[in-house]
Amino acid sequence: MLKKLFFGSLIISLIIISSCSTVNISSISAKAVALSTPGPKMRILGHFHESVRYWFTIGGLVNLNEPDVDAIFMKEMLKYNGDGICNLHLKDQFGATDILISLGVGIGGYLVGYSASSGTDQEKATSASLGMSLADLLISSRTLYLEGDIYKLE
């Protein structure tokens, strides 16, 4: 019975951490950000590859922070003294660090749930499984990868 509870809780936690979230990405800079390839009057100055972690709760329904992509864009354009960004690629991923964070949160919830119960072994296992599922539901993270080219207008 204990194994069934543990694996049931593990499956629920995996479903929760694989849920989707919405991230709004916007740039308020006066410089141009283009998703397409550069035009004939654009000279590529450099390439950048950055990542930023964002946090959410309730299985992805509520974002706790928004990635500050504008700061990344401005930093890269200043570094190359560029006029804008082209060939922009954004990739949202539940990466290795996010998995480790989720495992740590789940194990913490499991331990809290187990120690909170003073009943039988079955009651402790139920409490621990519930704690693990709730912990993963309460906080999770994902990583946004940004890649692109900095251009200068000629």
Image: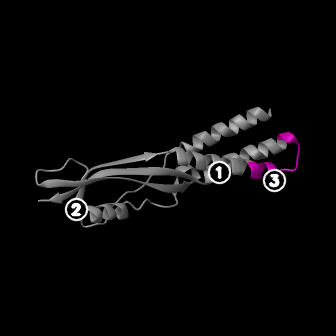
Identify the residue at image location x=49%, y=56%: 54
- What residue is pinned by disc 1? 105
Dot 1 or dot 3, earlier in sequence: 1
Q: Secondary structure at mark 1?
A: helix
Q: Secondary structure at mark 2?
A: loop
Looking at the picture, which amino acid does disc 1 mark? Answer: Val
Identify the residue at image location x=49%, y=46%: 20
- What residue is pinned by disc 3? 116
Considering only vertical position in the picture, is 5 above or below 132?
A: above
Q: Quadrant of the N terminus?
A: top right
Name which quarter of the figure residue 126 lies in.
top right
The stretch drawn in magenta includes residue 19: no
Identify the residue at image location x=36%, y=61%: 72
Spot occupied by residue 119 in the image (x, y as percentages of width and height): 88, 47
Question: Crowding at label 3, few (<14), some or many (≥20) Cα neighbours within 10 Å?
Answer: few
Dot 2 or dot 1, earlier in sequence: 2
Dot 3 or dot 2, earlier in sequence: 2
Residue 82 tag number: 2
Looking at the picture, which amino acid does disc 2 mark? Answer: Gly
- Structural distance between the alpha carbons of marks 3 and 2: 57 Å
Foreground: disc 2 or disc 1? 2
Considering only vertical position in the picture, is 24 above or below 100?
A: below
Looking at the picture, which amino acid does disc 3 mark? Answer: Ala
Spot occupied by residue 34 in the image (x, y as percentages of width and height): 24, 53
Question: Crowding at label 1, few (<14), some or many (≥20) Cα neighbours within 10 Å?
Answer: many
- Structural distance between the alpha carbons of marks 1 and 3: 16 Å
Magenta-highlighted residues: 111-122
Foreground: disc 1 or disc 3? 1
